[in-house]
Structure formats: C-alpha cells, structure tokens
Amino acid sequence: DTGVSQDPRHKITKRGQNVTFRCDPISEHNRLYWYRQTLGQGPEFLTYFQNEAQLEKSRLLSDRFSAERPKGSFSTLEIQRTEQGDSAMYLCASSLWEGGADTQYFGPGTRLTVL
Amino acid sequence: TQLLEQSPQFLSIQEGENLTVYCNSSSVFSSLQWYRQEPGEGPVLLVTVVTGGEVKKLKRLTFQFGDARKDSSLHITAAQPGDTGLYLCAANAGNNRKLIWGLGTSLAVNP
C-alpha cells in the first residue's frame, strides 16, 4: 500500500499526558498537512510543510502543539499536556505541489480521546 | 477571508432519489476538489476540477465547476445507501496558498 499512513489509529490518554502521532506521506509528495476534525465537521487546518520547512501554522495551534518533518519525509505531531478539548480525529494529508492543483491525499486518521 | 459554503448541510433521502450538493464562494479558485468521508476514516478524493465550466463524471456522480471558477456542484443520480457519508469540497486559490475547506454535506441514503 503506497498511500498515506498514520500511527496509531486510536489513542486514549489521560488529561495532562503528552501524545505523539506519526504520519508517513506518499513517498514522492513534497507537501504534508495536519488537520483536526470533530464529528460532522470539515477538516480544520493545523499546519503544513513543504519538504522539511514548516510554512504555516494555524492560530488555533496553541503552544502545546508542535509538528516536525525533520528529513522531509515522515512527520510527527506532538500534543503536550493534553486537555479534553483536544479530543478529535487528527488527519494527515500529502500532496505533490508543482504549482497547479494542490490535490491532497489523506491518511486514515488518528482518533484521540482525552479522558 | 475566503470561505467555501456548502449546502445543504444535512440531507436525508430515499434510495433511488437524485440529489445535488453545492459549494459556493465569492472568490475565484484555480482548482477545486470533492472528497467523500465515511465515519472514522480519512476523506477520500473523488475528483479535481481545474477548468471553468468543466464537467466530470464518476459513475452516478457528476461534478461541475462553475464558468467563473467560484462554485461547484455534485449531482448524484439514483442514490444508493453506499453513497452515505460526508461530502467535502476544498479549493485552491493558487499563489502557493493552502486549500480552503467547506464544512461538508452529511448525506444519508435510506434503503
């Protein structure tokens, strides 16, 4: 399977704990996106990378959230001191940006539940 | 602020009926994508449209990009229970900007 993969698929944690999610994009894709999604709503943009450079972060991304893509391949999203409001589906997507349509392909998501 | 408005927000129909979902904006876009998402899964790309007035068909689904590239529609003919899901549109304003997302249309097709 050469699609976008995410790990873990599900994560249950207690409030105050740190969690880290991983995303492996489609290998030739240079852009990688992180989104958050709550039930019945569209994806909410968090941040994106072009190669290893983090080009934009949403103002919704508090200081507790950090994302990295150190070698321009896989990416990690860390949430520190989790809160119950962080409970959501965290989606990763990748695309091959060549100046045209930025068609994004999504992974299956990581469902986070903060107790 | 660029916005994509999807309508209707919710739609519940009987198997065999036709439906149309709309994605509208006051902004011009260089391309627009439609995705379908099932509960607990990531969105799956259905189509990308790039040319004003473009029409693409995917089996019973017909996608149209407005002549002015500000809006799009998705028409489903003879809906089936397997069409149930969240339909999302996303558009690219070009100039290296990230995609703008609609809030989605939640479709339920009842047998």
Image: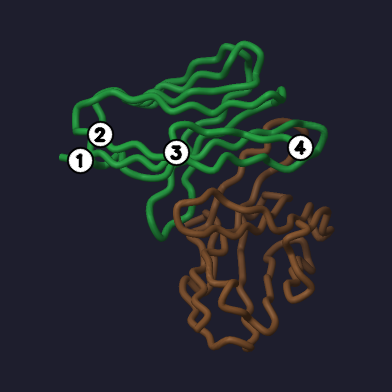
Q: Which chain is green?
A: B
Q: In whole angstroms, how far apart are the C-alphas of marks 1 and 3?
A: 17 Å
Instruction: Tell me, yes or no, whether the two marked residues, 4 and 3, touch with CB atoms within 8 Å.
Output: no
Across and down, in percent, residue A104 comes to 61, 44
Q: Are marks 4 and 1 in contact (CB under 8 Å)?
A: no
The kind of residue on which mark 4 rests is Thr
Q: Is residue B64 left or right of residue B26?
A: left
Relative height, residue A58 to residue A76 (above, below): above
| Residue at (63, 78) in percent of width and height | A20
Query: Quarter-wise, where is residue A85 in the image?
Result: bottom right
Identify the residue position indicated by label 2 in the image. B13
**Mark 1 or mark 3: whose residue is earlier in sequence:** 3
Please give the letter of the chain rendered in brown.
A
Instruction: Specify the subunit that label 3 lies on.
Output: B
**Image quadrant where one finds the C terminus of chain B:** top left
Q: Are marks 2 and 4 in contact (CB under 8 Å)?
A: no
SS under mark 1 = strand
Residue A15: % across, % down: 58, 86
Q: Which residue is mark 3?
A: B9
